[in-house]
Image (tube, rainbow, N blue to C red):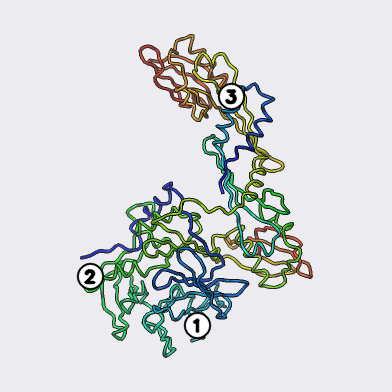
Amino acid sequence: MKKTRLLLIAFIVFVSSLVVQSQTNYEYYSIENLEIYCPSPDNRSLYTIEIINHLNVLLKRDLVSGEILETYKTKLPSGDIGAMAVTDDEKSIFFVTNKENENGRLPLSDAIYRVSLKNEKIEKLYTLNKDINFLTKLVVIDNKLLLNPYKGLSYLFNTSKLTNKPVLEDENYRMIFAAPEQNGLVFAKMADSEMMDMYFCDFSKKMKLTLIGKFQPNLRISTEEDENKVPYFIIENKNFDWVSDSYNKNRYPSPVMMLADNKLVMDSYSKLNEYEYISMLSFIDDTYLIGGRGSKKSISVYNIKNPKLTKTPTVSAEDMTGIEALMSSEISFEKEKIQSDVLQQVFNAVFYTIVFTEQETAESSRTQTFIAYFANDVYAELKEKEDIIFLIKKDFVLNEENAIIFQDALDVLYPLDYFDKKAKTNYKKDNQWIFVRSESFGEKKGFVLFMNGSSKIIGLKADVEIK
Amino acid sequence: MKTHIVLFFLAISVGINAQTNLSEKEQKGLDELINSSITIDADAIKSQAISKILDAEFFEVATVYKHLDIELNSELMVVKHKGNFSKFYGVDELLPFVNSSYKMTSQEQATDFEKVLDKLFPVFYAANKEIYQKDGQWFFIRDESFGEKEGVVVSVDDKGKVIDIEFKGGIE
């Protein structure tokens, strides 16, 4: 039995892909004020309907460059468009407009239009009188159009006879995807059981339904791993081995969450510039990802095989100078050498304090002090307290006398406040020398230095609890 | 565009020289350490609607501190207005940049303004967006949570000239 995992192998794939720090993949280009798009059959271009001066305009753009190849003069209806599709011969574009829903917030489908790309004429083919939700997909199948709305029955519109009929009358059958190359649709039949029957509906055989396998549609993400559920299908009829490939070809555009089973897409998604805003994805020719941002009515086109790793500058040199001047005028660094005899006795380095100040608003500023040092002919920041071990003189040994000097050196680098001064002490314990630096509610913290038999320092921990 | 802002910080450092006891070598070494740690990254926020309605240009600016242990996530918006650059803190500061010729008298003009908001202050859920007019004010709902709407309220005079722009929560 062939088991094909669908939709989600594991949410972990999705989550882990988000946390991986990786180099940003910048978009080749973006299209703003975009109403809807669909790729051309050869995947080399995009047909788009874009809003220009409040008018919907049909364009053809080069997929890779975004360059406008054609601007069609056709006067399109105004308003939202739910979905569009192009015929395989690229002679016609179909699209379905939306209308307001008086009984709810989500729009309904309004009318079906056809634009002839040759003579740029538009025809309103059909007005949808029934309450059909807005479309999530419009697919050209032979001389028919498949209308797949958000929830509810899928319809088949005959573009010659101008008739519109549900593919199946039974609302229990829900479309999983359309397979135009097979002239049909794959449905699941809703049932109470976890596994639902999966059918192929063959348009060339008078909508004949063939049971092809089982479908588990549920997606459940839980902190309890054994409660996680992942949609998948099992193909039990060997004549339908094509289903998996067809699904992967015809599933786009798809909500990002529904693509979590595709590791390549999900790994690539988390690297896309501003991926947080991308909610829909199309994957074209195993190379291009088209990210859709519903909230901004825009798409960006990315190449995942040949990622663009540097951003195209959008700011002129002159403006950059102005921005830098603004930012730098509100930041200052005050540098000072830390003058101390004890530091020289312990460390093979010269230390500096650098005070960073940023004027955040007219009323408030923030200040932060950090320590820099000069050692081995290099200026560097002393990031972690533990790092001072690398700067201690090689011949410095810890004994009663030197412990006081070391403690004084710590006081210079990391001054103590009034209460911490009361807790300050040092003592030897086995092969460790303890320097208590603070005490709060009975909990002591400080430095622990580890020594070898010659009292040389071989290890150091900072800010550790001292028991 | 990403640029190291060496020159500016060198200029600042020179100013501090007089107050400290650092040698020339130390000044130079520390300045190089500071300068190598900071980059400024800026992106222009452009759209037809912004150019049409606002007499200003907007930028997303990030100051990145690569090495220095400075706690910050310094990302902000900068606005360029009449050649001057200043920090831009939000919708309540938008009014001075609205073109004096811009009028909000129709749904279409309000939609243009919404496009400006979408560009400068994008929303996560487009479904929550809404535009309506009430008592000489235009309401641009941007988000909704637990039944309370929040968004931008634009007051106009009887000719549609924008006289106030304010972000409000608890609408309705």
Q: Secondary structure at mark 3?
A: helix
Mark 2 falls within which chain? A
**Mark 3–mark 1 contact, CB under 8 Å?**
no
User: In the displayed structure, does residue A2 sit left or right of residue B13?
Assistant: left
Q: Position of residue B31 (x, y in %)?
A: 59, 31
Which residue carries the number 1 mark? A113
Gap in Å between the C-alphas at discs 2 and 1? 39 Å
**Mark 2–mark 1 contact, CB under 8 Å?**
no
Which residue carries the number 3 mark? B25
Gap in Å between the C-alphas at discs 3 and 2? 78 Å
Q: Position of residue A388 (x, y in %)?
A: 48, 23
Which mark sits nearer the N-terminus, 2 or 1?
1
* Kind of residue sitting beneath label 2: Glu
Residue A112 in sight: no
* Kind of residue sitting beneath label 1: Tyr
**Mark 3–mark 2 contact, CB under 8 Å?**
no
